[in-house]
Amino acid sequence: MPSPVIQTLLILLDRDLKRLGVEAQLKAVPGDIVRVEQRIAAEKAAIEAARTELRDLEAKKKVLETEIGSAEDKLGRYKSQQLLVRKNDEYQALSHEIETTQTQIGDLEGNELELMYAIDEARKRFSAAEAELKANISGHEARIKMLQEREISLIAELKAVRAEVAAAREPIGEPKLRLYDRIAVRNMPAVVPIHHVDKCGGCHLKVSSEVVSAARGKGGDPMAVLPTCDQCGRIVYWEG
């Protein structure tokens, strides 16, 4: 059975580990909130991208409609001029222009059909993105509210745990407390058992026979000097 001083240190260790756990959870909350906000921003960006794509396609369609209209006007003028000419070479030249313009109109109309299909698909993507955001936004906002409430709860819990830590420190003498604090800064848990194979429960390396003897309370008062691992420096005790 651990000595009384080790038992008080184990109580302190338990409180400290609990404190560290609460502090870690509290530290993670702002990052969790940021990640939810980033998801909201990403979904809004997806909607805006879909909206921009749709607007760009509609703008291209208007330009294309204008080009088709201009080509049709040009075709009408060529046909009217052709009715008035008397020379065969002029007639043939206008026939060539008419044929070229008709081909141009056909190409433009083909492009217009492709663009109309693209607009239809872009409109579907925009509607889907908008519907997804509306479905998710309330959930995201609820998640943020829950995280904010959790943060408040953790702050209160941390205050209580710190009070428990302070109470657990009171029965421990100053020299032993200084040793514990020095170890706890770099190696937690700061107090670990020695296993039956004489290995440290922290670093899992074999400790010297002197440390084992001290941990078992042989050769002196086990409360006088706390035994520590030869390798990692943690306070050790014999598990029994």
Image (cartoon, rainbow, N blue to C red):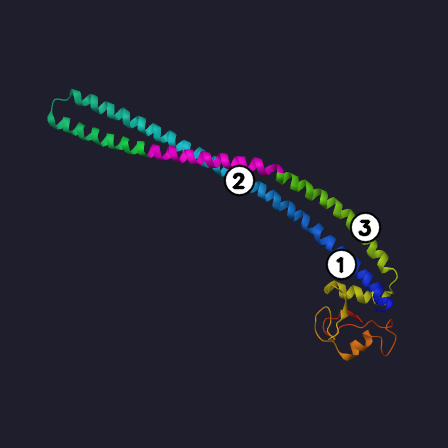
x, y percent for residue 69: 31, 26
The amino acid beneath tag 3 is Ala
Q: Is residue 110 magenta?
A: no
80 or 239, nearer to the observer: 239
The type of residue carrying mark 1 is: Leu
For disc 1, the neighbor class at 10 Å (few under 14, some 14 to 19, many from 20) is: some
Does residue 184 appear left or right of residue 34 in this picture? Answer: right
Label 2's element?
helix
Q: Residue at x 57, y 36 (%)?
A: 135
Magenta residues: mostly which secondary structure? Answer: helix
Is residue 194 left or right of 38 when viewed as pictured? right
- Secondary structure found at label 1: helix
Residue 115, above or below 161:
above
Within-10-Å neighbours for mark 2: few <14, some 14–19, many 20+: few
Q: Kindly indicate the quadrant of the structure image that contains residue 196.
A: bottom right
Are dots 3 and 1 in contact, CB under 8 Å? no
Mark 1 vs mark 2, CA separation in Å: 42 Å
Q: Looking at the image, which is closer to me, 219 or 180?
A: 219
Q: Earlier in the sequence, mark 3 or mark 2?
A: 2
Q: Which residue is mark 2?
A: 45
Assess disc 3: are there few (<14), some (14-19) or many (≥20) residues with their C-alpha within 10 Å of its C-alpha.
few
Q: Nearer the viewer, mark 3 or mark 2?
A: 3
Q: Give residue 17's mark.
A: 1
**Residue annotated with mark 3:** 160
In the rendered image, the quadrant that contains the N terminus is bottom right
Q: Position of residue 220 (x, y in %)?
A: 87, 77
Of residue 44 and residue 175, the one placed in the foreground of this image is 44
Q: Magenta span covers which residues?
A: 111-138
Separation of marks 3 and 1 at Cα, in angstroms:
14 Å
